Image: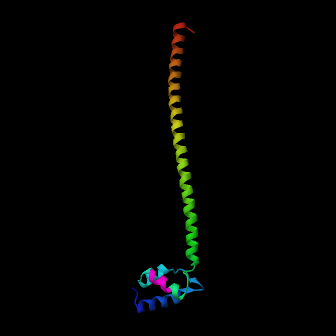
Amino acid sequence: TSTVEDRRLINMKLAEVYADGGYVTPWTDQRVADDLGVPRAWVAEIREGFYGPEGSNPLFDKYLTESADIALHLAQLAEERKVAGEMVKRATEAAAKVRTRCDELEAKVRDVQALGKRVERELGR
């Protein structure tokens, strides 16, 4: 439970950092609580009683908006990266199969060339 002195200090701090229906940048209930070393609930209770709703902090609102936007882009990018990784894996596997077929064909070509030389020697062509 807050003491009279706690409530007085909180009220004095709120008078400094709360104006026009909201906190001035960069203040919030939590920041006031941290600054004074009191529970956030005490700050919220006194602010509600004397000043009104927590209101908006433009800097914090901007941070929340931009953070949410970045989080969305990061999630999309992670999905795109996953899809690209799967495509690279499939392409790598396909390339390995093509390489194996090329190696097999090259071996057959060498065998046929050797056979051709043998035919030339034995049949005199």
Residue 35 percent across, percent down from the top left:
44, 83
Q: What's the image's color scheme? A: rainbow
Tell me which residue sits at (51%, 8%) in the image.
122
Quarter holding the N terminus? bottom left
Residue 72 percent across, percent down from the top left:
57, 61
Tell me which residue sits at (50%, 19%) in the image.
111
Q: Nearer the viewer, residue 34 or 95?
A: 34
**Furthest residue to the right?**
20
Which span of residues is magenta-colored? 41-46
When asked about the image quadrant of residue 38, the answer is bottom left
Q: Is 33 above or below relative to 103?
A: below
Q: Nearer the viewer, residue 117 or 24?
A: 24
**Magenta-drawn stretch, dominant element (helix, strand or loop):** helix
Tell me which residue sits at (57%, 56%) in the image.
76
When asked about the image quadrant of residue 34, the answer is bottom left
Q: Is 112 above or below relative to 51?
A: above
Tell me which residue sits at (55%, 48%) in the image.
83
Residue 116 percent across, percent down from the top left:
54, 15
Please count the marks in the image. 0
Q: Is residue 71 magenta?
A: no
Q: Is residue 44 magenta?
A: yes
Quarter holding the C terminus? top right
